[in-house]
Amino acid sequence: MLEIQHLTVKYGYHPPSVKDFSLSMKPGEIVSIVGESGSGKTTVIRSLLGALPKGGQVVEGDICFEGESLLGKSDEEWRQLRGKRMSMIFQDSGVMINPIRKIGGQFVEYIRTHEDISKKDAWQKGVIMLEKMCLSNGENIMNSYPFQLSGGMRQRVGIAMAMVFQPKLLLADEPTSALDVTTQAQIVRQMMELKEVHNTGIIIVTHNLGVASYMSDQILVMQSGRIVEMGNQEDVLYNPSHTYTKTLLESVPKMEGKRYV
Ligand SMILES: Nc1ncnc2c1ncn2[C@@H]1O[C@H](COP(=O)(O)OP(=O)(O)OP(=O)(O)O)[C@@H](O)[C@H]1O
Ligand SMILES: [Mg+2]
Protein backbone atom coordinates (compact mmCIF):
# COMPACT_ATOMS: atom_id res chain seq x y z
CA MET A 1 0.00 0.00 0.00
CA LEU A 2 2.82 2.38 0.95
CA GLU A 3 6.43 1.99 -0.02
CA ILE A 4 8.96 4.60 1.07
CA GLN A 5 12.44 4.12 -0.29
CA HIS A 6 15.54 5.92 0.90
CA LEU A 7 13.70 9.14 1.57
CA THR A 8 15.98 12.11 2.23
CA VAL A 9 14.54 15.52 3.03
CA LYS A 10 16.32 18.84 3.38
CA TYR A 11 15.33 22.30 4.49
CA GLY A 12 17.30 24.82 2.44
CA TYR A 13 21.02 24.25 2.66
CA HIS A 14 20.94 22.63 6.08
CA PRO A 15 22.07 19.03 6.46
CA PRO A 16 19.20 16.60 5.78
CA SER A 17 16.48 16.51 8.44
CA VAL A 18 15.48 13.03 7.30
CA LYS A 19 18.07 10.70 5.88
CA ASP A 20 17.60 7.40 4.07
CA PHE A 21 14.18 6.63 5.51
CA SER A 22 12.59 3.43 4.17
CA LEU A 23 9.31 1.86 5.19
CA SER A 24 6.96 -0.67 3.69
CA MET A 25 3.35 -0.86 4.84
CA LYS A 26 0.52 -3.25 4.03
CA PRO A 27 -3.14 -2.20 4.02
CA GLY A 28 -4.54 -1.95 7.54
CA GLU A 29 -1.15 -1.91 9.17
CA ILE A 30 -0.36 0.45 12.03
CA VAL A 31 3.12 1.95 12.29
CA SER A 32 4.27 4.10 15.19
CA ILE A 33 7.13 6.55 14.93
CA VAL A 34 8.80 7.52 18.19
CA GLY A 35 11.89 9.63 18.77
CA GLU A 36 13.18 12.75 20.42
CA SER A 37 12.18 16.25 19.47
CA GLY A 38 13.74 17.34 16.19
CA SER A 39 14.46 13.78 15.04
CA GLY A 40 12.41 14.29 11.86
CA LYS A 41 9.07 12.63 12.64
CA THR A 42 6.87 15.47 11.44
CA THR A 43 9.08 15.94 8.39
CA VAL A 44 8.43 12.33 7.35
CA ILE A 45 4.67 12.69 7.80
CA ARG A 46 4.57 15.96 5.90
CA SER A 47 6.59 14.52 3.02
CA LEU A 48 4.00 11.79 2.65
CA LEU A 49 1.25 14.34 2.48
CA GLY A 50 3.11 16.56 0.03
CA ALA A 51 2.91 19.29 2.62
CA LEU A 52 6.45 20.17 3.63
CA PRO A 53 6.86 23.69 4.97
CA LYS A 54 8.50 26.28 2.74
CA GLY A 55 12.11 25.40 2.01
CA GLY A 56 11.55 21.71 2.65
CA GLN A 57 12.33 19.39 -0.24
CA VAL A 58 12.62 15.69 -0.90
CA VAL A 59 16.12 15.43 -2.37
CA GLU A 60 16.40 11.67 -2.69
CA GLY A 61 14.28 8.57 -2.63
CA ASP A 62 10.74 7.76 -3.62
CA ILE A 63 7.32 7.42 -2.06
CA CYS A 64 4.89 4.99 -3.69
CA PHE A 65 1.30 4.96 -2.53
CA GLU A 66 -1.10 2.37 -3.94
CA GLY A 67 1.24 1.72 -6.81
CA GLU A 68 1.98 5.27 -7.91
CA SER A 69 4.84 7.58 -7.11
CA LEU A 70 3.80 10.65 -5.14
CA LEU A 71 6.81 12.75 -5.96
CA GLY A 72 6.30 15.07 -8.87
CA LYS A 73 2.53 15.27 -8.44
CA SER A 74 0.92 18.57 -9.34
CA ASP A 75 -0.92 20.67 -6.74
CA GLU A 76 -4.21 19.62 -8.28
CA GLU A 77 -3.28 15.94 -8.08
CA TRP A 78 -2.35 16.41 -4.43
CA ARG A 79 -5.69 18.05 -3.71
CA GLN A 80 -7.46 15.03 -5.20
CA LEU A 81 -5.43 12.65 -3.09
CA ARG A 82 -5.51 14.45 0.24
CA GLY A 83 -8.59 14.01 2.33
CA LYS A 84 -9.92 11.25 0.14
CA ARG A 85 -7.27 8.55 -0.10
CA MET A 86 -4.90 9.88 2.51
CA SER A 87 -5.67 12.17 5.40
CA MET A 88 -4.17 13.59 8.52
CA ILE A 89 -5.05 14.18 12.14
CA PHE A 90 -3.15 17.02 13.73
CA GLN A 91 -1.81 17.24 17.23
CA ASP A 92 -4.60 19.59 18.18
CA SER A 93 -7.41 19.49 15.71
CA GLY A 94 -8.31 22.92 16.98
CA VAL A 95 -5.64 24.11 14.57
CA MET A 96 -7.50 22.68 11.63
CA ILE A 97 -10.90 23.80 12.84
CA ASN A 98 -11.71 27.48 12.59
CA PRO A 99 -12.51 28.62 16.16
CA ILE A 100 -15.14 31.17 15.22
CA ARG A 101 -17.29 29.06 12.91
CA LYS A 102 -19.71 26.35 13.93
CA ILE A 103 -18.56 22.78 13.30
CA GLY A 104 -21.44 22.00 10.95
CA GLY A 105 -20.66 24.71 8.40
CA GLN A 106 -17.01 23.72 8.31
CA PHE A 107 -17.72 20.02 8.06
CA VAL A 108 -20.21 20.51 5.23
CA GLU A 109 -17.79 22.73 3.36
CA TYR A 110 -14.99 20.21 3.79
CA ILE A 111 -17.10 17.33 2.50
CA ARG A 112 -18.27 19.39 -0.48
CA THR A 113 -14.75 20.26 -1.57
CA HIS A 114 -14.25 16.56 -2.30
CA GLU A 115 -17.69 15.34 -3.17
CA ASP A 116 -20.42 16.75 -5.32
CA ILE A 117 -23.38 16.40 -2.95
CA SER A 118 -26.05 18.73 -1.55
CA LYS A 119 -25.51 20.63 1.69
CA LYS A 120 -28.26 18.56 3.30
CA ASP A 121 -26.60 15.27 2.36
CA ALA A 122 -23.20 16.54 3.45
CA TRP A 123 -24.68 17.58 6.79
CA GLN A 124 -26.18 14.14 7.25
CA LYS A 125 -22.89 12.50 6.37
CA GLY A 126 -21.15 14.71 8.94
CA VAL A 127 -23.64 13.77 11.65
CA ILE A 128 -23.19 10.05 10.96
CA MET A 129 -19.41 10.39 11.06
CA LEU A 130 -19.48 12.27 14.38
CA GLU A 131 -21.70 9.63 15.90
CA LYS A 132 -19.32 6.92 14.74
CA MET A 133 -16.62 8.74 16.70
CA CYS A 134 -18.75 8.28 19.84
CA LEU A 135 -19.98 11.85 19.85
CA SER A 136 -23.47 10.78 20.77
CA ASN A 137 -25.47 13.75 19.56
CA GLY A 138 -24.06 14.57 16.16
CA GLU A 139 -26.66 17.27 15.43
CA ASN A 140 -25.71 19.07 18.62
CA ILE A 141 -22.03 18.93 17.79
CA MET A 142 -22.67 20.25 14.27
CA ASN A 143 -24.50 23.21 15.82
CA SER A 144 -21.69 23.97 18.29
CA TYR A 145 -18.78 26.34 18.12
CA PRO A 146 -15.41 24.66 18.67
CA PHE A 147 -14.92 26.45 22.01
CA GLN A 148 -18.08 24.84 23.32
CA LEU A 149 -16.44 21.42 23.00
CA SER A 150 -13.79 19.81 25.17
CA GLY A 151 -10.31 19.10 23.78
CA GLY A 152 -11.18 15.43 23.40
CA MET A 153 -14.41 16.21 21.60
CA ARG A 154 -12.63 18.59 19.22
CA GLN A 155 -10.03 15.93 18.54
CA ARG A 156 -12.79 13.47 17.70
CA VAL A 157 -14.31 16.02 15.34
CA GLY A 158 -10.88 16.20 13.70
CA ILE A 159 -10.77 12.43 13.37
CA ALA A 160 -14.32 12.36 12.02
CA MET A 161 -13.28 14.83 9.33
CA ALA A 162 -10.11 12.92 8.55
CA MET A 163 -12.09 9.68 8.25
CA VAL A 164 -15.13 10.82 6.34
CA PHE A 165 -13.86 9.49 3.01
CA GLN A 166 -12.44 6.32 4.54
CA PRO A 167 -8.88 6.93 3.42
CA LYS A 168 -6.50 4.07 2.89
CA LEU A 169 -3.85 5.86 4.90
CA LEU A 170 -4.27 8.00 7.98
CA LEU A 171 -1.37 10.06 9.24
CA ALA A 172 -1.53 11.19 12.83
CA ASP A 173 1.09 13.51 14.29
CA GLU A 174 0.86 13.24 18.06
CA PRO A 175 -2.90 13.08 17.96
CA THR A 176 -3.33 12.44 21.64
CA SER A 177 -0.56 14.32 23.37
CA ALA A 178 -2.75 17.30 24.28
CA LEU A 179 -5.35 15.06 25.88
CA ASP A 180 -5.93 13.48 29.27
CA VAL A 181 -5.32 9.75 29.67
CA THR A 182 -8.95 8.68 29.45
CA THR A 183 -9.57 10.63 26.28
CA GLN A 184 -6.27 9.38 24.86
CA ALA A 185 -7.47 5.84 25.35
CA GLN A 186 -10.75 6.58 23.59
CA ILE A 187 -8.99 8.13 20.60
CA VAL A 188 -6.62 5.20 20.38
CA ARG A 189 -9.55 2.77 20.44
CA GLN A 190 -11.28 4.77 17.73
CA MET A 191 -8.24 4.59 15.51
CA MET A 192 -7.94 0.85 16.06
CA GLU A 193 -11.55 0.52 15.03
CA LEU A 194 -10.84 2.30 11.74
CA LYS A 195 -8.22 -0.27 11.05
CA GLU A 196 -10.60 -3.12 11.90
CA VAL A 197 -13.63 -1.79 10.05
CA HIS A 198 -12.15 0.03 7.06
CA ASN A 199 -8.71 -1.56 6.85
CA THR A 200 -7.16 1.88 7.17
CA GLY A 201 -3.38 1.92 7.41
CA ILE A 202 -2.19 4.32 10.09
CA ILE A 203 1.11 6.04 10.77
CA ILE A 204 1.10 7.58 14.20
CA VAL A 205 3.78 9.82 15.65
CA THR A 206 3.76 9.59 19.41
CA HIS A 207 5.89 10.23 22.46
CA ASN A 208 3.94 7.63 24.29
CA LEU A 209 5.56 4.19 24.14
CA GLY A 210 2.47 2.72 25.74
CA VAL A 211 0.32 3.91 22.87
CA ALA A 212 2.94 2.78 20.36
CA SER A 213 3.17 -0.70 21.76
CA TYR A 214 -0.58 -1.13 22.17
CA MET A 215 -1.45 -0.06 18.66
CA SER A 216 1.28 -0.94 16.30
CA ASP A 217 2.38 -3.71 14.03
CA GLN A 218 5.69 -1.93 13.53
CA ILE A 219 7.52 0.56 15.74
CA LEU A 220 10.13 2.89 14.28
CA VAL A 221 12.57 4.76 16.43
CA MET A 222 14.13 7.87 14.92
CA GLN A 223 17.14 9.87 15.98
CA SER A 224 18.76 12.74 14.10
CA GLY A 225 16.77 12.10 10.95
CA ARG A 226 17.52 8.39 10.75
CA ILE A 227 15.71 5.24 11.68
CA VAL A 228 17.82 3.74 14.43
CA GLU A 229 15.52 0.88 15.29
CA MET A 230 12.64 -0.82 13.58
CA GLY A 231 10.61 -3.90 14.29
CA ASN A 232 7.53 -5.25 15.96
CA GLN A 233 6.70 -4.60 19.58
CA GLU A 234 8.66 -7.63 20.70
CA ASP A 235 11.86 -6.57 18.91
CA VAL A 236 11.81 -2.94 19.87
CA LEU A 237 10.47 -3.05 23.40
CA TYR A 238 11.90 -6.27 24.71
CA ASN A 239 15.11 -6.56 22.74
CA PRO A 240 16.15 -3.01 21.92
CA SER A 241 19.47 -2.92 20.18
CA HIS A 242 20.05 0.79 20.01
CA THR A 243 21.22 2.79 23.02
CA TYR A 244 18.67 5.49 22.36
CA THR A 245 15.78 3.01 22.45
CA LYS A 246 17.11 1.64 25.73
CA THR A 247 17.22 5.14 27.20
CA LEU A 248 13.69 5.78 25.97
CA LEU A 249 12.50 2.60 27.62
CA GLU A 250 14.29 3.34 30.84
CA SER A 251 12.34 6.56 31.09
CA VAL A 252 9.13 4.54 31.40
CA PRO A 253 8.47 3.79 35.07
CA LYS A 254 8.41 0.22 36.34
CA MET A 255 5.75 -1.24 38.59
CA GLU A 256 6.50 -4.35 40.61
CA GLY A 257 9.50 -4.95 38.42
CA LYS A 258 7.45 -4.92 35.23
CA ARG A 259 7.60 -2.13 32.73
CA TYR A 260 4.15 -1.16 31.59
CA VAL A 261 4.45 -0.08 28.01
N1 LIG B 1 10.22 24.71 8.41
C1 LIG B 1 11.46 24.31 8.71
N2 LIG B 1 12.55 25.00 8.26
C2 LIG B 1 13.80 24.59 8.55
N3 LIG B 1 14.09 23.51 9.30
C3 LIG B 1 13.06 22.79 9.78
C4 LIG B 1 11.69 23.15 9.51
N4 LIG B 1 10.89 22.24 10.12
C5 LIG B 1 11.72 21.36 10.74
N5 LIG B 1 13.01 21.69 10.53
C6 LIG B 1 14.18 20.95 11.04
O1 LIG B 1 14.06 19.58 10.72
C7 LIG B 1 14.45 18.76 11.80
C8 LIG B 1 13.35 17.78 12.10
O2 LIG B 1 12.19 18.47 12.55
P1 LIG B 1 10.79 17.77 12.77
O3 LIG B 1 9.80 18.83 13.03
O4 LIG B 1 10.53 16.84 11.66
O5 LIG B 1 11.08 16.95 14.11
P2 LIG B 1 10.07 16.13 15.06
O6 LIG B 1 10.69 14.79 15.24
O7 LIG B 1 8.71 16.19 14.51
O8 LIG B 1 10.16 16.92 16.43
P3 LIG B 1 9.04 17.16 17.57
O9 LIG B 1 8.97 15.90 18.38
O10 LIG B 1 9.56 18.29 18.35
O11 LIG B 1 7.74 17.49 16.89
C9 LIG B 1 14.80 19.70 12.95
O12 LIG B 1 16.19 19.79 13.01
C10 LIG B 1 14.20 21.02 12.56
O13 LIG B 1 15.01 22.07 13.00
MG1 LIG C 1 6.90 16.96 15.23
Image: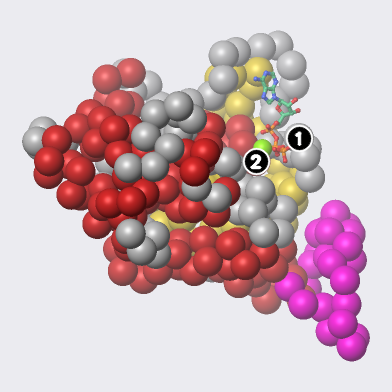
Viewer-proximal residue, 44 or 90?
90
Check disc 1: other Cα within 10 Å, few if <14, some if 14-19, many if 20+: few
Q: Secondary structure at mark 1?
A: loop
Q: Which mark is residue 41?
A: 2
Q: Tell me the residue that label 1 is attached to.
A: 38
Residue extent of the magenta highlight = 239-261
- On the rendered structure, is 53 left or right of 19? left
In terms of image quadrants, where is residue 195? bottom left
Q: Nearer the viewer, residue 200 or 133?
A: 133
Residue 49 percent coordinates (x, y): 44, 33
- Label 1 near ligand 1 (CB < 8 Å): yes
Does residue 47 belong to the magenta stretch?
Answer: no
Q: Residues within 10 Å of mark 2 (few under 14, many from 20)?
A: many
Residue 224 placement, left or right of 126: right
The amino acid on which the numbered mark 2 sits, given as a three-letter code, is Lys
Secondary structure type for disc 2? helix
Identity of the residue drawn at 73% across and 73% down: 261
- Res. 106 image quadrant: top left
Camera-nearest residue between 98 and 87:
98
122 or 63: which is nearer to us?
A: 122
Whether residue 236 sits left or right of residue 90 in the image: it is right
Residue at position x 88%, y 62% in the image: 251
The location of residue 61, given as percent across then percent down, is 52, 32
Location of residue 121 with respect to 136 vertically, above or below: above
For the residues marked 2 and 1, what is the alpha-carbon distance in whole angstroms?
8 Å
Asked if the beta carbon under badge 2 is closer than 8 A to the nearest atom of ligand 1, the reply is: yes
Q: Is residue 66 visible?
A: no
Can you see residue 190? yes
Verify whether residue 250 appears in magenta: yes
